[in-house]
Amino acid sequence: MKLISSIVGVVLLSASIALAYLANTNAQKVMASKNLIVEKYVKNSTDALATQDIKGAVKFAKLAIAADPKNKAGFKALEAVYEVKYKPAENNDEESVEEPTKDDSPSKEAPAAEEEEEETDMGC
């Protein structure tokens, strides 16, 4: 009886080692495929940015982030897009600076008119 339980124990131990090895190699393959997907989206984003397609560049950078949020390359690509998109004007002449108009300034909204509440008999 002890011999059978020893054999079963050895078989289970070897099976668990084999399963752990296969799971580890599978995880490595998944991570490698995620990295390839992120690289593809980042390349598409930089290509779109080079052609001044800001919407496309943002789309591909966000797809890279969605493919692997732990990979920083997607975030760096999105940062590069936003740097181009929101780049301040290089010409600092006084003529190029637009003064805010009255419509652009924040307005103070009048408080909402308080409605007079009518007392209603609810029958209580």
Image: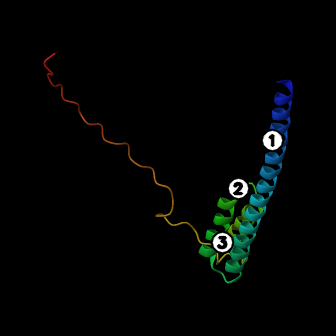
The amino acid type of the residue labelled 3 equals: Lys
- The residue drawn where x is 14% and y is 22% is 121
The secondary structure type at the circle numbered 3 is: helix
Residue 110 image position (x, y, % from top left): 38, 46
CA separation in Å, label 3 and label 1 = 53 Å
The secondary structure type at the circle numbered 1 is: helix
Height in image: 56 above or below 65? below
Residue 113 lies in what quarter of the image?
Answer: top left
Q: Comparing marks 3 and 2, which lies closer to the viewer?
A: 2
Q: Which mark is residue 16?
A: 1
Residue extending farthest bottom: 51
Height in image: 52 above or below 87? below
Height in image: 53 above or below 6? below
Q: Is residue 47 left or right of residue 124?
A: right
The amino acid type of the residue labelled 1 equals: Ser
Q: Earlier in the sequence, mark 3 or mark 1?
A: 1
Q: Is residue 92 visible?
A: no
Q: Earlier in the sequence, mark 3 or mark 2?
A: 2
Q: Is residue 2 left or right of residue 86?
A: right
The amino acid type of the residue labelled 2 equals: Pro
Residue linked to disc 3: 85
Q: Earlier in the sequence, mark 2 or mark 1?
A: 1
Height in image: 16 above or below 5? below
Q: Is residue 58 left or right of residue 33?
A: left
Residue 13 lies in what quarter of the image?
Answer: top right
Q: Comparing marks 3 and 1, which lies closer to the viewer?
A: 1
Kindly check if marks 2 and 1 are in contact, taking CB atoms under 8 A apart as contact: no
- Label 2 environment density (alpha carbons within 10 Å; few <14, some 14–19, many ≥20): some
Residue 85 image position (x, y, % from top left): 66, 71
- Label 1 environment density (alpha carbons within 10 Å; few <14, some 14–19, many ≥20): few
Along the line of sight, which residue is nearer the eye, 26 or 108? 26
Residue linked to disc 2: 69
